[in-house]
Image (cartoon, rainbow, N blue to C red):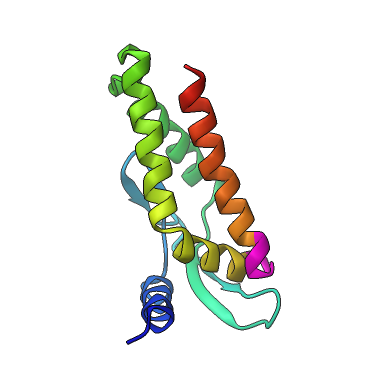
């Protein structure tokens, strides 16, 4: 199987797991209403995935969980050099998955692949920039 075929199989696997829930504080957050909706490729109109239709109370819960995750983490207490290491690791992980993330972004936004690749590279560069500022 070629790398492109492998990538397409991975994308299909990710998008077919639906309905896809929200995520906050390490927890999946399905819609409290049980409602879902289809996400479509803006270029072709093809259904990409089914996702949970999060309600206001779901968003409130996500904000609460994210706040708890931050408060319970030691991030603010980590020495700056350790935080830099984590930001570089994040950039490394995104860079290792750049083809996958770029394809998903392209499909979701209807962008040409080159623009999506530039967006992902911008994220990588931004993480490295802020890591190196410290």
Tally of numbered discs: 0
Q: Residue at x 44, y 40 (%)?
A: 62
- The answer to whether any part of residue 30 appears in the image is yes
Where's residue 74, x and y in %? 28, 19
Q: Where is 88 relative to 18, above or below?
A: above
In the image, 90: left or right of 35?
A: left
- Between 52 and 81, the residue placed more toward the observer is 81
Quarter-of-image position of residue 100: bottom left
Where's residue 12, x and y in %? 41, 79
- Residue 125 belongs to magenta span: no
In the image, 106: left or right of 94?
A: right
- Read off the magenta span: 109-115
Where's residue 41, x and y in %? 63, 75
Q: Where is 112 relative to 78, above or below?
A: below
- Between 27 and 95, the residue placed more toward the observer is 95
Q: Where is 17 relative to 2, above or below?
A: above
Quarter-of-image position of residue 116: bottom right
Q: Residue at x 48, y 24 (%)?
A: 132
Q: Residue at x 47, y 58 (%)?
A: 98
Q: Where is 125 relative to 40, above or below?
A: above
Where's residue 95, x and y in %? 44, 52
**Position of the N terminus by quadrant:** bottom left
- Between 123 and 104, the residue placed more toward the observer is 123
Q: Residue at x 47, y 34 (%)?
A: 63
- The answer to whether any part of residue 70 appears in the image is no
């Amino acid at each position: 199987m070629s790398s492109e075929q492998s990538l397409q199989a991975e994308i299909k696997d990710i998008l077919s797991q639906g309905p896809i829930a929200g995520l906050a504080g390490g927890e999946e957050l399905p819609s409290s209403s049980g409602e879902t909706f289809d996400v479509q490729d803006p270029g072709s109109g093809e259904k990409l995935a089914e996702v949970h239709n999060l309600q206001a109370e779901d968003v409130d819960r996500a904000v609460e969980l994210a706040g708890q995750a931050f408060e319970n983490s030691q991030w603010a207490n980590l020495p700056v050099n350790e935080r830099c290491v984590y930001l570089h690791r994040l950039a490394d992980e995104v860079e290792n998955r750049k083809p996958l993330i770029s394809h998903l972004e392209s499909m979701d936004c209807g962008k040409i692949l080159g623009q999506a690749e530039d967006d992902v590279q911008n994220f990588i560069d931004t993480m490295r920039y802020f890591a190196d500022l410290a």
